[in-house]
Each structure stands twice: as structure tokens, then as C-alpha cells.
Image (cartoon, rainbow, N blue to C red):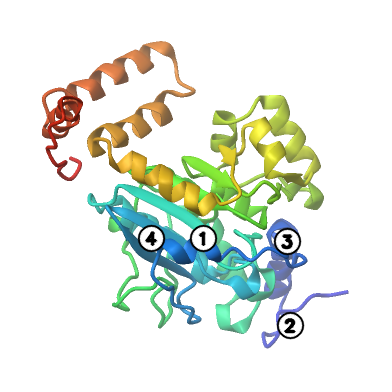
Amino acid sequence: MHIIFPGSPKCSGCKCAVIIMLSWRAIHSITYPSSRHVFVSSMSRFSRPFTSSQDNVVTIADLGKGIKHVQLNRPEKLNSLNMSMFESIANITNQLRNDKSVRVVILSGAGKAFCTGLDISSMLSPLEGNPQMNLEQLLTRPLEYAHNSSTNGGISTTTKDTILKPSTLPKNIGNLVQNVAYLWREIPAPVIAVLHGMCYGGGLQIALGADLRLSEPNCKLSMMEAKWGLIPDMCMSITLRELVRIDIAKELAMTGRVITSEEGAKLGLITRCHEDPMGEAVKVANEIVSRSPDAVALTKRLFQETWVTNEADCLQLETKLQKKLIGSWNQLASSAKNFSLNIPYVKRK
């Protein structure tokens, strides 16, 4: 049976693109049964209402104190990833990376799931462009994230002109598929992923790009690539090595086994489980913002750059970063709190 992109000429290129898309990325496109738990009550307590127009597939809310809440916002599709969402995530990470007022980022999904991976039906839709071009955009590096579109790339902002030029993009060492998971690591502020319902395929790999993962105990996690004859391809070769033993990584990647967040916490994938993970994330975020923004940012950098490197480099970077902190305004403000002196922090350097 030949698979032909609807509305396109019956050319081998189109058929090839569709076949490749269905095989290479179908792992992220499955429509999963709806979870019974709707993740709304906790979020509504902390952030103002999110917009839900078609374009606003990723939204940002300001929770105060420099805490930003980024939400994947395709609840009707279980937050599966289409091109607009890929572009939005890339643009948003750049926006947050360059905003020194940001102290903590909380990342969650609207509706019944965090994210269930790639939305193949959307990727093959005429509304999303040519499937072969979409595939090339996902895999090619270096790349321009935003394709030719009249939308703003899906970000909920007040301006339509959000398409980024290559010179303004964050550190780009991967393709777009990899960078939507990797670039959370490039934000100097800590990123807390809040998981619920389902976190499959690309959704799990995005979550692993965060610094912390707080989850409902019964949230389902899985790397689905093994079921489609593929390997994990969204920077999991970087994130997994920091979290689990190599034998655990191999088993999960080779089997595609579905596990709960409770088991994930025991294995190291999940920071911890909580009945109200969003409330816990806000609590942790408030603890973090009580500390020096410079020290927090450099702590993130220190561990990410030394976790798997040699000992000499680790010791050298410790000294280099510590010298940046000693005697700085925020270091003195932090120390003063130990003597009941409340000196406000300034933006991180």
C-alpha cells in the first residue's frame, strides 16, 4: 500500500517523505487513551489564565518573583508536537535564556497529559506544509527554526514578529528535534518540569532536558523508539547519562517499557513524586529565588559542565566560577541574610 500525502502530486519524493516520517518518527505520534486525571486544579491557583487559540501552542505566564510558567498548550491533542510547537519551544528557550530577570522556569502541559510526542497527522497535514520539508527542518543543522508562516510560531505574545534569525538563536549544536529538549539546559535559570498523565517519546525527552522533574505518582513514562526500530534521538544520549546507570538506560531504550513515575523516581528519571506536583514546583521555585541568582545560575553551569568530564577540568571550573561570585553584590546580599540583614538581590550577571 502506497502512502500519499493528501493534496500533493503522486511523486516518489512525497511518498518517500511520508514513509520516512511514519517510520522514523511514528513513535511520537500515537494517539493514546485519555487519562482520567485532568491537570488543572493546581495550575489555576498560581498563574493567570492561559490563552487557548490555535496559534498559542506554547504559553508563558508570570508567577511573580522572576518565576515563569511555560505550558505546552495543545490539550485536545494531548500536547503532541507539531511544527508550531517545535518552533515555539525553540523560540521560548531563547527568550528565557536572554532574560536575566528570570529566576526559575516551571514547564508543564495543559489538559490530561504532559506531552505524548510527535503529532504525525498534523505533520502530514497540508496546513503544516510539505512533509518532506518538515522532515528536513527537523533534522538539519544549523537551522532556521521558524518556517515561512504568517503566525508567530505559536508563542503567546503581543507581537507577531517572533521569527528568529540564526545569529539570535541559542547555542545550536543539535537539530530542531534535539534542541527542543536540549535548549532547556542552556537557560541559566533552573527549569522544573511538572509531569502528569502521560509523558511519552518526545515528551519524556523534553522533560529530561529540565533540571528537576516533579511528577504525579501514576504518570506513565516511556521511550517508544524501540517499538519502531529506532534509537532515542532528542539529546537523550546527554541527559540519560546524568541520571541513570548505563544498564538502566539500555533496558528502557531497548524495550520501550512503560513505567510509572514512582518507578522512574527509583531509577533516577524523576526527582520525586508528589500528589500536587505543580504546587510542589512553586514551593521549590520560591525556595530557589530566595538564594543568590548568580550562585544558582553558576551552580547549574558547574554541574552540567563537569558531571561527566575529567577531574582536572572539574576542579578548574569550580575555582573559575567561585572567583566570579566572591565579593559580588549578590554574594554579599546572600551572606547578609545570615545576620538578619535583608539586602535585595540584583539581576544575575
The amino acid beneath tag 2 is: Lys
| Residue 339, image quadrant | top left
- Rendered-image quadrant of the C terminus: top left
Separation of residues labelled 2 and 1 (CA atoms): 49 Å
Q: Amino acid at mark 3?
A: Ala
Label 3 and label 1: CA atoms lie apart by 32 Å
Who comes first in sequence, dot 2 or dot 1?
Answer: 2
- The mark nearer the N terminus, 2 or 3, is 2
Give the SS element for disc 2: loop
Q: Which-is-in-front pick, marks 3 and 1? A: 1
Measure the C-alpha gap from mark 2 to mark 3. Answer: 22 Å
Q: Nearer the viewer, mark 4 or mark 3?
A: 4
Mark in front: 1 vs 4: 1
Tell me the crowding category of disc 1: few under 14, some 14 to 19, or many 20 or more residues within 10 angstroms, Cα based: some
User: Which secondary structure, mark 1?
Assistant: helix
Taking 149 as reference, is 334 above or below it? above
* Earlier sequence position, callout 1 versus callout 4: 1
In front of the other: 186 or 22: 186
Direction from residue 217 to residue 61 in the image, left or right: left
Q: Is residue 106 left or right of residue 9?
A: left
Q: Which residue is mark 1?
A: 42
Where disc 4 sits, the SS reads helix
Comparing labels 2 and 1, the label whose residue is closer to the camera: 1
Residue beneath disc 2: 10
- C-alpha distance separating marks 4 and 3: 25 Å
Q: Amino acid at mark 1?
A: Ser
The image quarter containing residue 318 is top left
What kind of element bears circle 3? helix
Residue at left 13%, top 28%? 332
Marks 1/4: CA distance? 23 Å
Q: Which residue is mark 3?
A: 26
Q: Earlier in the sequence, mark 3 or mark 1?
A: 3
